[in-house]
Amino acid sequence: MSATSLAEKWVDGTAGMTRPSNVVWCDGSKAEYDRLIEEMLRDGTLLPLNARTYPSCYLHRSHPSDVARTEQLTFICTRDKQDAGPTNNWMAPPEAKAKAGAYFDGAMRGRAMYVIPYLMGPAGSTMSRTGIMVTDSAYVVASMHIMARVGNVAMKAMRRDDDFIAGVHSLGDLSPDRRLILHFPEEKLIWSVGSGYGGNALLGKKCHALRLGSWQARQEGWLAEHMLIIGVEDPKGDVTYLAAAMPSASGKTNLAMAVASLPGWRVWTVGDDIAWIHVDSTGQLRAINPEKGFFGVAPNTSPKTNPNATAMVKSNTIFTNVALTPSGEPWWEGLTPQPPAGLVDWQGRPWRPGTPAAHPNSRFTVPVHQCPSVAPNWEEPQGVPISGFIFGSRRTKVIPLVFEAFDWTHGVFLGSAMSTETTAAITGQVGVVRRDPMAMLPFCGYNMADYFAHWLATGPRASNAPRIFRVNWFRKGEDGKFLWPGYGDNVRVLKWIVERIRGGGRAQETPIGWIPAADGLDTEGLGLSRAQVAEALRVDRGEWLQALADLGDFYDQFGSRLPQAIAATLADTRRKLGT
Ligand code: GTP
Ligand code: SPV
Ligand code: MN
């Protein structure tokens, strides 16, 4: 059999179902990207932006009902429902295929079907993985060009005839009533129909790298996580690598490219959304960023909050659902203090004050290498050595600015105990507190209880297990204002974390973990009073006991599948808080 025969057979079968007018195999070249852009400018899928101030940048306006991930339409389709677990939507594979099959049937008539071989991870890395997706959306192909390594590089990386995750994508009729995002981990297969939005449609990203990735990672003994990866450089030039999980639209991109407010400190960007982490032969945890681009949240990206991102989206960027200024520049809330006159909103209408100009989940798609803070070793095939994990979420109350787990098991418990306030990255109500273990609630492709067990088992396999920290930039005071300035000042928290990892960092023990001592955090020049810092770090026993009662209810749904160590750590924490 030739190297591509299985792939070709599968592509033929898929074309038989979707009936495109022609099939185009993508080579990943610049010429191909340019052709796609031309075509989309012609048919109005893309609008050109100001060629002088935003060269090779374009605006895409999506269907107004297709602006975020749709979790209620996302399913894990395993033979046994228990393997998807109680936190995932589940559908039996035959039923899923019958339902989506009807939407796919003839869906590409009159359109081209693009075949995109893609590689997740640096070329030459044993941690990288390959996929082949088909789509009838030129926007998806161009976005995949930016987000993944596409074309010949991927074909070359396939180790066997069947060494690919297969993905079928069609825009369908874009109706949420005929939209399904289906994962068949037992068949290494993804079916997505009815949406052109990022996480629903760029199948290498959440569908492959996280949902199917986490399934494979458990079988093969590694971790696929919703994490940024950074190198934190201290004034002596030593770099400590950290990986941080935070829910959607809750600070990963911003922390990944933070500009330190402390002299001599620097953050190097390796990744902003997904980390694949392996224990190497010496017992060191090493992480790669499987992606090659950023699909970042536009609103509130500004020279003040994220100067690196603001600079990197000035060329070769596709913007989706942002507003447009009369001079053809993109605009979103927070970019400048005042909206420019004559704005056109994300739906192409004259902007009316009091309505969103950019959609709250408007995004930019841009190559990683354009980031001014990109780490020189970000594509190193062996990845970067991870010394610490951070779990962060968006909580107005309860969760202190930063604290450290007592040990690996306690850290896994803290990750499993995360809850967060929902954001515009998912369709539904914004600001509702929900459980989001390890920021993986929407992305874990198997039973979450087994995922906790997999995490528990990974630490002991490391010769020097990373330290685990919990952070919350979003706690508010009684005046309703954030207690912590955030953004570049988050590097002050990173400094304490790095000090703790290196054996310093003043801390005090509390029932929930190690909190910075009164003089532990470097707050010089912030203008915060001691009382304000103490408030940001406060552990409220009453609030915590209440939160842990809710956590107990969450754990109960896993029944006997919940690891004993997680239940025991919860009981232990309650005991400590109660006395
Ligand atoms: P996904 O791409 O959806 O996975 O999101 P992400 O985790 O990368 O989120 P991102 O960094 O884009 O942040 C989303 C929102 O959180 C933006 O509106 C940011 O301005 C805001 N944000 C990020 N960091 C901070 C912070 O330190 N403090 C405050 N108050 N807001 C922040
Ligand atoms: C997220 O929602 O966590 C994102 C955007 O990073 S998407 O790619 O749509 O999942
Ligand atoms: Mn994400």
Image (cartoon, rainbow, N blue to C red):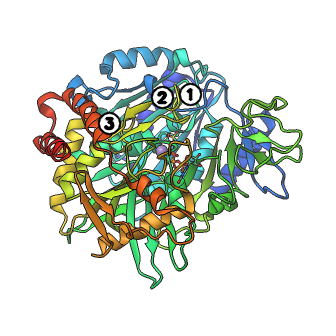
Describe the element under mark 1 as helix, strand or loop: loop
Q: Is residue 276 above or below residue 104?
A: below
Report which quarter residue 284 is drawn in.
Answer: bottom left
In-image side of 525 versus 327 (left or right): left
Q: CA distance from mark 2 to mark 3?
A: 15 Å
Residue at mark 3: C-beta within 8 A of ligand 2: no
Image quarter of the C terminus: top left
Describe the element under mark 2 as helix, strand or loop: strand
Q: Is residue 136 above or below residue 236?
A: above
Q: CA distance from mark 2 to mark 1?
A: 8 Å
Q: Residues within 10 Å of mark 2 (few under 14, many from 20)?
A: many
Q: Residues within 10 Å of mark 1 (few under 14, many from 20)?
A: many
Residue 445, labelled with which disc? 3
Q: Which is closer to the viewer, label 2 or label 3?
A: 3
Are the residues tagged 3 and 1 within 8 Å (C-beta)? no
Q: Residues within 10 Å of mark 3 (few under 14, many from 20)?
A: many
Say which residue appears at 77% left-offset and 44% top-offset: 38
Which residue is under mark 2?
192
Q: Earlier in the sequence, mark 3 or mark 1?
A: 1
Which residue is under mark 1?
195
Q: Amino acid at mark 3?
A: Gly
In-image side of 308 versus 87 (left or right): right
> In the image as oriented, which residue stretches furthest toward the bottom?
236
